[in-house]
Each structure stands twice: as structure tokens, then as C-alpha cells.
């Protein structure tokens, strides 16, 4: 995307009270930061916890010094932010105790209530995708207008989609494209806190940060004097988190690290504001019925209930477009009552022969193989018509990959010759395979 998505950034807190966190909580976080990272300069400490030095970190450092946990030893420049803060023996002992309770260090968290409010303000259901946008997003795939017409309303519903059909017809590619088509950008915090527990939310593996958005977008309450944004939040593209056969029920709950003593947000919480793809649905170690039982309340109430190790149950917003993709018959996986809760059921059919030809042409072009109608006709007649084999969207890619490998081995140019097509198909298809 060539333009930077516009988003209102929360203004930087001007006091400890505006952070929503207590002086004691911040003092513990700063003390652990000094202890673990060996930071000493005031502005370095403020940068580590993503809070302003003036009026927030400065009074926290004053508190630590008055409690004889740290002391100031010189300065490297002008102003309090350049003071060198050294941890004392009592401070070192206290930091060790705190690390036994909770090893989280990094950007200060935001309160769960604040996170919930932001998720609601940037709800996926408030966004609309048009036919032109969706068609453009899917232009790398050969997809008929009928599927486009079904996908568009399903995406705009921001609820749930069931993609089903034979393997190799692009269900995963379609789902991934849906994730990329979701408009706009959203804010997520690095971490949230609730009941004295910390839940890490931002995940560099699944979230695509937009650094330029924080340098070009005004804050919510921008005045004549520019006010910095709250750096405890990150601007990201609407996420797409894809999980396949490895998904377990435990993956959908808070992940508590018994060593670090804080939580990792579950997949669906990380996917808030975006899409969550459950690929190969029905092939997970847990049964489809158990998985769907887990989703009943979130799908209907748009709220998820998570349980802390202490036993506290917390309410977390559930603003996720759930996409189930399977090559199994939906009726064999779940009963009608469950299917009713999945609003949109979209069949991804085998490609027509015209679509198969277009896919084949695109794949030959990618590999610089000269396209020839004679070669395609030979392939279709010998390995589809005569064997009563149904075409799959993935066949052209796979067969041509085999053909290129064989040509390179033989030291010849890849072409759609009968010999190379025969050898590629014999290597790719199971001889006894029949249409199923």
C-alpha cells in the first residue's frame, strides 16, 4: 500500500495518573528495568518503558531514590534526564524479589478497560470492502465472480466464514487474501494489565507494524503545541493469524509462563481487529465439536472469557473475522446447529476448464515456459479426460514445477513437450488415482 493509513493516536500521558497505573506498579517496572538492562540514564529508562520522562518516569525515579533503592551518581549532560541512576544493595535485593513474582520488563502495559475501549472504537464491522477492492486483492488468483459475490458480504459481516471444497483449489490462498484485504490500520498495546497480571499482546511474528504512521499522524487531542503519542501503543495493519493442524484448545486460552510469571495473549486476542484463519479445519488433535463449542459464546456475544492462573475470569473483546477452511464435508464435521452459527458457507469449487487454462497460462509465464495450446490439450486429454480426473487449481503449478525439475536435470529447456509432460505427470499423479 503506497499511502500511510490514517489513525488517531492516543496522546502521551502527562502524569502517573493518566497512565492508569499506580506509582507502586511503575516503580516495580522501572526497578526491574534498571536491574535487568543495567540502564542508568533517566531518558534511557523512560525509553525502555515507553513513557515520558517528565512528570511520569522522573517522579518514579524520585520515589525509588527516597526509598533507598537507587541513588544518583553524577550526570552525563544537562537536566534530570541525564542523571545516572545506580541500583543500591536494597534495590538489588528488592529487584530479585520482584523478578520472582513477575519477570516482565519492557513497555508499560495499559489497563484492560482501556484496551477494550480502543478495540470497540476501531471495530472491524465499521469497515467496508467493495467489490472493486476485493477483486483487486484477489487478482493474483483465478476466481469466478460468483465467489467474489459471496466473499464480499461475508467479509463485511465481520463474523465467520466457512470455506470448503476439494484440496488444492485455493482455500488457504483466498483466506490469506481476505486478511490482506481488510481496510485500515489499528492500534494495539504492547501489553495489558488486569488484576495485577500482565498479558503480552504485541507479537512481531503475527503483527505488521507501520512505523511511519506514528511520525505522520496527529494525536487525538492535537493542539497548537504538538503532543507526542502514547508509545505504549503500536500501529499495525489489521492482522491475519493463520493456524493449521497444530491448533489445540490450550492455544485459545491465556498462555501462562511459570518461569516469567506473565501471560501471552491467545491467538484470537492477537487477531482482534483482523482475521483468524483455522486452516485444515477438522484435522486438529481436538475434535471440531470441541473447537466450535469453544467459539459459541465469542461468535454470538463478541466477547471472550479468559481465566487467569489465579482463577479470575476476565472479559476480553472478540472483534475477529473467523475463517474456517477445510477439504472435508462440513456436514461430516459438525451438526446443523453448529453450522447455523457459522454465518457464511462458501464452496470453493474445482476450476472450470477455462479457469484451468488461465491458471496454466499464468504458471507457465512465471517459469518462462513458452505456452502452447497443443501442450495443454495433450495434458488435459491424457491425464484428465482419459483418467476421469477432476482438475484442481494447484495442479498447473505442481505439474510445471515437476517439468522444470526434470528439464534442468536433463539439461534441456523447459517446454510443453509430450515427453516432459508425461514424465512430470507420472511423477506427480498416483497411477491408480481416480476421480473422487
Image: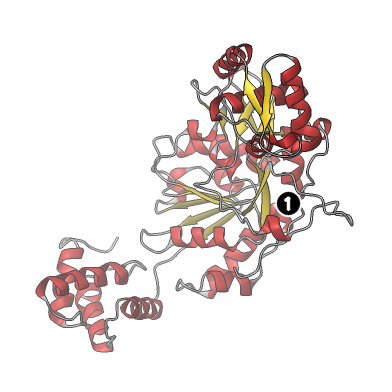
Q: Residue at x 80, y 39 (%)?
A: 13
- In terms of image quadrants, where is residue 401? bottom left
Q: Is residue 379 left or right of residue 142?
A: left
The reply to whether residue 288 is in sight is: yes
Q: Is residue 433 above or below residue 37?
A: below
**Which residue, as the protein is rendered here, is positioned at the far right?**
224
Q: Is residue 425 left or right of residue 279?
A: left
Q: Count of labels shown?
A: 1
Quadrant in which the N terminus appears: bottom right
- In terms of image quadrants, where is residue 90? top right
| x and y, in percent, of residue 267 in the image | 54, 40
- In terms of image quadrants, where is residue 237? bottom right
| x and y, in percent, of residue 392 in the image | 34, 67
Q: Residue at x 59, y 69 (%)?
A: 134
| Front-lying residue, 178 or 72 | 72
Q: Is residue 373 left or right of residue 325?
A: left
| Front-lying residue, 76 or 416 | 76
| x and y, in percent, of residue 106 in the image | 60, 34
Could you say whether the residue bearing mark 1 is in a helix, strand or loop?
loop
Q: Residue at x 68, y 62 (%)?
A: 5
Circle 1 sits on which residue?
122
Amino acid at each position: 500500500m503506497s499511502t500511510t493509513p490514517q489513525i488517531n493516536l492516543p496522546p502521551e500521558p502527562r502524569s502517573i495518573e493518566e497512565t492508569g497505573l499506580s506509582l507502586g506498579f511503575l516503580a516495580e517496572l522501572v526497578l526491574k528495568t534498571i536491574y535487568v538492562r543495567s540502564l542508568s540514564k533517566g531518558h534511557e529508562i523512560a525509553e525502555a518503558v515507553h513513557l515520558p520522562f517528565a512528570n511520569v518516569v522522573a517522579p518514579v525515579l524520585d520515589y525509588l531514590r527516597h526509598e533507598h533503592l537507587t541513588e544518583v551518581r553524577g550526570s552525563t549532560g544537562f537536566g534530570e534526564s541525564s542523571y545516572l541512576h545506580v541500583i543500591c544493595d536494597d534495590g538489588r535485593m528488592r529487584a530479585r524479589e520482584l523478578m520472582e513474582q513477575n519477570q516482565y520488563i519492557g513497555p508499560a502495559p495499559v489497563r484492560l478497560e482501556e484496551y477494550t475501549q480502543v478495540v470497540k472504537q476501531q471495530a472491524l464491522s465499521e469497515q467496508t470492502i467493495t467489490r472493486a477492492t476485493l477483486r483487486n486483492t484477489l487478482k493474483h488468483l483465478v476466481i469466478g465472480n460468483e465467489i467474489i459475490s459471496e466473499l464480499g458480504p461475508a467479509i463485511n459481516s465481520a463474523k465467520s466464514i466457512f470455506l470448503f471444497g476439494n484440496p488444492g483449489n485455493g482455500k488457504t490462498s483466498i483466506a490469506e487474501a481476505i486478511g490482506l484485504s481488510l481496510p485500515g490500520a489499528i492500534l494495539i498495546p504492547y501489553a495489558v494489565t488486569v488484576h495485577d497480571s500482565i498479558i503480552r499482546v504485541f507479537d512481531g511474528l503475527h503483527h505488521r507494524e507501520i512505523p511511519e504512521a506514528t511520525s505522520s499522524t496527529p494525536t487525538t487531542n492535537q493542539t497548537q503545541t504538538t503532543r507526542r503519542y502514547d508509545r505504549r501503543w503500536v500501529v499495525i495493519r489489521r492482522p491475519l493469524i493463520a493456524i493449521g493442524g497444530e491448533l489445540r484448545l490450550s492455544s485459545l486460552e491465556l498462555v501462562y509462563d511459570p518461569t516469567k510469571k506473565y501471560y501471552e495473549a491467545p491467538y484470537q486476542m492477537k487477531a482482534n481487529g483482523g482475521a483468524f484463519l483455522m486452516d485444515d479445519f477438522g484435522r486438529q488433535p481436538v475434535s471440531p465439536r470441541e473447537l466450535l463449542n469453544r467459539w459459541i459464546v465469542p461468535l454470538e456475544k463478541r466477547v471472550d472469557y479468559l481465566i487467569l492462573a489465579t482463577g479470575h475470569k476476565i472479559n476480553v473483546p472478540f472483534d475477529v473475522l473467523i475463517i474456517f477452511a477445510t477439504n472435508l464435508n462440513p456436514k461430516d464435521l459438525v451438526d446443523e446447529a453448529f453450522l447455523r452459527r457459522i454465518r457464511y458457507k462458501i464452496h470453493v469449487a474445482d476450476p472450470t476448464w477455462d479457469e484451468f487454462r488461465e491458471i496454466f497460462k499464468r504458471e507457465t509465464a512465471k517459469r518462462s515456459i513458452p505456452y502452447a495450446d497443443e501442450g495443454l490439450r495433450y495434458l488435459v486429454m491424457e491425464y484428465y479426460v482419459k483418467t476421469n480426473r477432476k482438475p484442481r487449481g494447484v495442479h498447473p503449478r505442481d505439474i510445471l514445477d515437476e517439468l522444470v525439475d526434470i528439464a534442468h536435470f536433463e539439461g534441456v529447456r523447459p517446454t510443453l513437450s509430450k515427453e516432459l509432460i508425461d514424465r512430470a505427470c507420472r511423477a506427480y499423479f498416483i497411477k491408480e488415482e481416480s476421480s473422487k
